[in-house]
Each structure stands twice: as C-alpha cells, then as structure tokens.
Image (tube, rainbow, N blue to C red):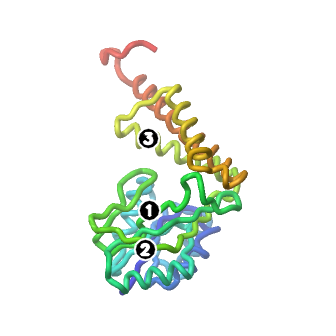
Amino acid sequence: MKISVVLITKNEAHNIRECLESVSWCDRAIIVDSGSTDGTVEAARSMGAEVYETATWPGFGPQKNLALSKAQSEWVLSIDADERVTPALRDEILAAIDSGQADAYDMPRLSRFCGRFIRHGGWYPDRLTRLFRLGKARFTDDLVHENVVTDAPVAHLRSPLLHYTYDDFSQVLRKIDQYSTLGARQAFARGKTASPASALLHGTWAFLRTYLFRRGFLDGPQGLGVALMNGQASYYKYVKLWLLHRQAAETLPPSAGLPPR
C-alpha cells in the first residue's frame, strides 16, 4: 500500500533535508512551497520531492489542502518541515496500514523548546491525526491551528512524532507575532470581540494554565518559557483582535450610528 507524505514549506532549508530523510521510505513526497528564497525548493527537489510553488498564502489549512489534492497514493502522511518520523514510528505506521483495521490514525507529538523536549504544560502527548487513507480526511480551512477532520474512526499509534520547534527565543518572538496576528484575523472573521481587559485575562489564564495547572514547571526553565510564550501569544491575539475592531469602526460612515471614541 503506497504512501504519499505531504507538507507545506516556506524558507525551511535548515529543516527540509532531515525531514525528507525521515520519510524516505514513503513512495512520494509532495511539497507546496509559498515563496521560499533560501534554497528550500532546490534542496527538496534534489531529494526527489515533488514541489509545487504558489505565489499567494491562503493560510495553513487551505495550503495543506492544496498539498493534499496532489496526493494519489492510497495513504497520506502529513508532517511539517520541522518534524521527524523516527524508525519506531515508521515501523508502527507500516504495520498499521498493513493491518487494515482503521482508515485514520493519530499519533503523539513530542516537541522540543529551546533545547529540551517538553512533556508537560499541555504539550504532550499532543495527539494529532496525521495518517489517513486518501479521501477519508481533509484539513480544516483555518488560517492557523488547522487540524485534520474525518468521519472515520481514528485509531491510535504509540510512537511519538518528533517536533523540533523553537530553537531560540528570537524564533519564539517571531512565531508569537505571526500566530497572534493570524489568530486575531481568524477570530475577527468569525465575529468574536475583545477588549484590553479581556486580552489581559486571556493572557494571564494561558500562562497559569500552562505553568501551574498543566504542570509546566516540571520542565524547568524551558517550561517557564513555554508558559510565558503561551501567555504572550494569547494576550497579543486578543489585543490585535480589539485593534481590528477599532480599525473597522473607523472606516464606517457616521450614519452607521457608532458612538464617538
């Protein structure tokens, strides 16, 4: 039973070779790239991947669905460029699809933050549906934090997918800005509202939930870093959502009946 691995990229030259090496046992590697300028496309093609380049960025969910539309194998394995499939997970995947017992499988994901794999704070086991029979699942159309949806029962794999994310705090800050912006836009499109006070409450709760209630403190300094990152990301998301509503209000004519600021 053949397997297509699908992923999306942008400026992942530092990751793409090790990523593709970890799934070299798959029959096809399909990549949709959105304007890489660091040699990602050339590196991927040199390793035999099929790369499709796009000029626009529709969001994580739509982009992954585009990659999925290129798959033709019986099974699909979805990963990100900063993830690695271990030999143990590879063997479990092959055994699972050979058994024919399910059409979709989730797997635990073990993520590394600034040099340490994080096992608390809500980061593990972080089960994600990543393996499914073609036609049995698709990605949500969310701009960020997309996931796989399927009507098929989802079986479970035990071996973790390794996630090499956040090498340093400069990367953390960039991701906070990127994901909070996308999250705010997505919430705005869904009609959600926010205020500075609610942003502060959301940020505080995200920190406390990660660090105390989900025992992030057990992961040492990196656990504190994860909690601070979650708190900041949540705070900035809702501040940006509040600002989006203010900007929208300023563009409305006086006849709209909005009270003056």
Inter-mark Cα distance, 3 to 2? 29 Å
Asked if 185 appears above or below 121 in the picture, the reply is: above
Q: Earlier in the sequence, mark 3 or mark 2?
A: 2
- What label does residue 210 carry, if any? none
Which image quarter: residue 257? top left
The answer to whether 100 appears left or right of 10 in the picture is left
Tag 1 near tag 3, CB within 8 Å: no
- Residue 3: in sight, yes or no? yes
Q: Which residue is mark 2?
A: 77
Q: Which residue is mark 1?
A: 54
Inter-mark Cα distance, 2 to 1? 21 Å
**Percent from the top left, x then y, of residue 75?**
36, 78
**Percent from the top left, x then y, of residue 200?**
55, 30
Q: At label 2, which amino acid type do we have?
A: Leu
**Mark 2 surroundings within 10 Å by alpha-carbon count, few (fewer than 14), some (14 through 19), many (20 or more):** many
Q: At label 3, which amino acid type do we have?
A: Arg
11 or 210: nearer the viewer: 210
Q: Which residue is mark 3?
A: 185
Q: At label 1, which amino acid type do we have?
A: Thr
Which image quarter: residue 134? bottom left
147 or 208: nearer the viewer: 208
Please identify the residue farthest to the top as the structure is shown.
260
* SS at circle 3: helix
Q: Earlier in the sequence, mark 1 or mark 3?
A: 1
**Percent from the top left, x then y, of residue 80?**
51, 66
Inter-mark Cα distance, 1 to 3? 22 Å
